[in-house]
Amino acid sequence: MENEKEQSGGLTPEAQRDVLEAAMKAGHILLENGAEIFRVEETMDRICLHYGIRSGNFFVLSNGIFMTSGNEIEEIFAKVQHIPVSGTHLDRVAAVNQLSREIETGFLSPGDVKHRLDQIRVMPGKPKTMQILASGLGSACFCYLFGGNLRDSLSAFGSGSLLYVYVIFLSAPHLSKIVGNIGGGALVTFLCTVFYLFHFGENLNFMIIGSIMPLIPGVAFTNAIRDIADGDYISGSVRMLDALLVFFCIAMGVGLVFSLFHRLTGGVLL
């Protein structure tokens, strides 16, 4: 019995279960908030190994985690969690990474780790006002970067800010991802076209390109490429498909408004 306890890191079956639950919770938070597949697997593995669990096996997809553990020494454990594809919250990813480093120091018990993970999971995002202003500023900067002038950038700031008001208060809580992105692309195009017709801007194309940038899933697209490069073809393909679907929906919204303006005005105004 002493030999078994030593080989399993001196953990009771209840303590082993706490460690495995903590590892699963850490993986859930990372995957849910936009971390790469290899980061999720490595973090879960490090948590288990630190507390002496050698038999952990993890299979991570873009929307789910399969976890098993157990042998002739350690308790049998198996768990599956479905994790819907969602947004990116890098603050939570960074917090879990920092927690994994603190675990390596040896001062945290499995119970402490689970408590910290519960706190990380409910970490508030950035204030809505800051998100709206950041969207407007980002739109203005991208517009200028792509070749727009100061007036174009100011118009892009206005349309980018209004876009995120739509995203926060209408699209995210009430609309599906597809409809929300189509509506976002259409709203930006409509606003930029109105600004252009009233001579608040001179280059409509740069105004629209800059204003739709807050909708572009750049982190998800980059992570998809990284997952594919790391050999996680299933997860990378799913994330890539999700990002491409967003691109397609935005393009549909832009094309829809241009088509309506053309039909309603006979191509005179645009």
Image: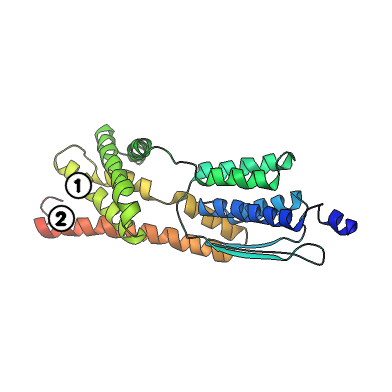
Neighbours of disc 2 within 10 Å: few (<14), some (14-19), many (20+): some
Residue 145 vertical position relative to residue 263 in the rendered view, above or below: above
Which quadrant of the figure contains the N terminus?
Answer: bottom right
* Residue 261: assigned label: 2
Asked if residue 160 is positioned above or below residue 175 in the image, the reply reads above
Residue drawn at x 25%, y 54% is 186
Label 1 SS: helix
In front here: 93 or 103?
Answer: 103
Q: Residue 102 location, x and y as percent?
A: 68, 39
Residue 194 sits in quarter: top left
Please give left or right for residue 140 compared with residue 42 in the image: left
**Circles 1 and 2: CB atoms closer than 8 Å:** yes
Classify mark 2: helix, strand or loop: helix
User: Is residue 266 in view?
Assistant: no
Identify residue type, mark 2: Phe
Task: Name the amino acid, label 1.
Answer: Thr
Q: Could you tell me if residue 133 is visible in this image?
A: yes
The residue that appears at 60% across and 44% down in the rendered structure is 115
The residue drawn where x is 59% and y is 46% is 117
Badge 1 is on which residue?
193
- The answer to whether 123 appears left or right of 266 in the picture is right
The tally of labels here is: 2
Would residue 36 appear left or right of 219 to someone viewing this image?
A: right
